Image: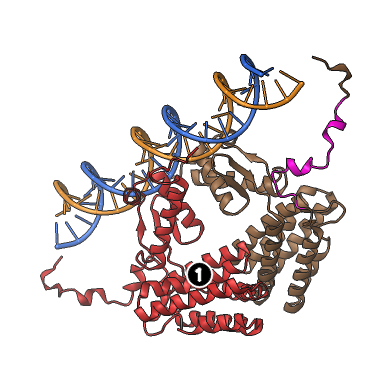
Chain colours: A brown, B red, C blue, D orange
Amino acid sequence: MVDEPKQSGSNDETIGNIYHQIYLAVIEQRLPPGTKLAEGKLAQIFGVSRARIRDVLARLVFEGIVEHVPQKGAHVARPTPTQARNVIEMRRMIEPGIVTRLISTLNDAKIGALMDHLEAEADARREKDAQLIIRLSGDFHCLLGTLCENEFLARSIRELSTLTCLMISLYNAPTREACRDDEHAQIVAAIVDRDEARASQLMIDHLEHIEASLMLNQAVDATDLDKVFASVNFRATRRQPETVEG
Amino acid sequence: MVDEPKQSGSNDETIGNIYHQIYLAVIEQRLPPGTKLAEGKLAQIFGVSRARIRDVLARLVFEGIVEHVPQKGAHVARPTPTQARNVIEMRRMIEPGIVTRLISTLNDAKIGALMDHLEAEADARREKDAQLIIRLSGDFHCLLGTLCENEFLARSIRELSTLTCLMISLYNAPTREACRDDEHAQIVAAIVDRDEARASQLMIDHLEHIEASLMLNQAVDATDLDKVFASVNFRATRRQPETVEG
DNA sequence: GTCGACTAGAATGTCAACATTTTTGTTTAC
DNA sequence: GTAAACAAAAATGTTGACATTCTAGTCGAC
């Protein structure tokens, strides 16, 4: 009669958990773009078989968070500048629609959820918890997607937000801040006022600020190392050859 | 030096091929919504191991074309009325954007591709090839997505178009036609004229015609059988109970 | 005749072992 | 000292077999 609690919960739960942990690690930049995700190591770390890890990686690949090259393995994705522009462009198309739809179905519970989130963001900013700030900034847009009660919109914005995190991690100018402090609060204010036009416009502005903060001109496309060390005079930085002989 | 051609091509190609064949079969309604997709049978049919079929099914599940219930297996998806409305709603958001972007990058090659497609659709209609008509109707929207040169938009509209096919298969009123004959041609005409406003409006009208042709009120949500026979007086249709006593 | 339990078959979930390819480290020739 | 060639190690790709779960068919009790 009584459900005997298995020590590790259902297996389906386990792989969802693994997915979430890797997902969070990518979002919070603990696994920077380009990081290799070796199946064997992950299997060892999470105490499951490689097949399970393979399923998780397949899902991450499908969502564009991870890139997979045959016989080479999986790596955290490195969106190209073109992809970055396309992500923002698509977000400009659907996010105004999301706020519009959210306003048309707004209720007290949703307003409460929005307020709670803003508070959490403010807290993270006060504590200067960089990882948390990044995560919550993305979560804000995911929350709007969830609250608008259209699962397809919600999934899309979630995937695009995640990619945006990777883009910021790759291309953000250190001097600028990708997410200005008060923009989310202003958007929420417009939503609560049920001012569709203002909310949509603020959202578009917000997305354009994000795009503007990215330095997409200096293409760091390739395998990293080539471009990173392209301007370094290799010989000059070595120690002088006087102590070395054959 | 010379590449020795393997008899069956690369394995990656093989699973892409299997995916495509199942995908086409779903689109063309040879595998109607709800059809069970047993791993073992598919493995036998395509001459590959079950693991390969599993990968293909996982991808179809990700795309929403196939539903998976633990311990029960995979079935061709049966979008609910709510899902159907949400799919159309999202399409209303992104497809005007797609035509706008397509117009801004239009060239002769793209116009040629659009014209070729219209011709193929007309041919299929002349030949009254129902399966081909359905497929090409969906392909039209995918083509717009591809031509607008934004991979994320292209993927989204491809997935949403596929789901729309399933929706039409489930909910289309037999008396109405989901895709009016000339609407695609009119949209293309507006695109070639570079008239963004008209093209967007025609696209929205087109999507609303599709939604209007669906009978989403009579919810056939559940496992099919329950609702289908809900209004049937079961006893009345049986033979009279004179031969039965307690 | 209906309902329930039981049993045989089939399908799914999982894993560990094997084959292939890539990468890394060492040796050898020039 | 450089560079190519070879060898060892690690990682990925793939498969077949086993365990568990669900389904369907049969049998027996009331």
| Magenta stretch: helix, strand or loop mostly | loop
Which image quarter is the C terminus of chain A in?
top right
* Residue B56 x/y as whole percent: 44, 52
Q: Residue furthest left?
A: B243
Report which residue position mark 1 lands on. Answer: B161
Q: Which residues are magenta?
A: A219-239
Q: Secondary structure at mark 1?
A: helix
Q: Residue at x 84, y 49 (%)?
A: A128
Can residue B149 be seen in the rendering of this structure? yes
* Residue B39 x/y as whole percent: 36, 50
Residue A97 magenta-drawn? no
Q: Is residue D29 above or below residue B78?
A: above
Image quarter of residue B188: bottom right
Q: Residue at x 84, y 17 (%)?
A: A244
Image quarter of residue B213: bottom left
User: Foreground: B112 or A5?
Assistant: B112
Please report, as a chain letter, where disc 1 is located.
B
Residue A234 magenta-drawn? yes
Q: Is residue A220 above or below residue B125?
A: above
Q: Amino acid at mark 1?
A: Ser
Left or right position of A210 against A18:
right
* Residue C5 x/y as whole percent: 25, 46
Q: Residue at x 86, y 56 (%)?
A: A176
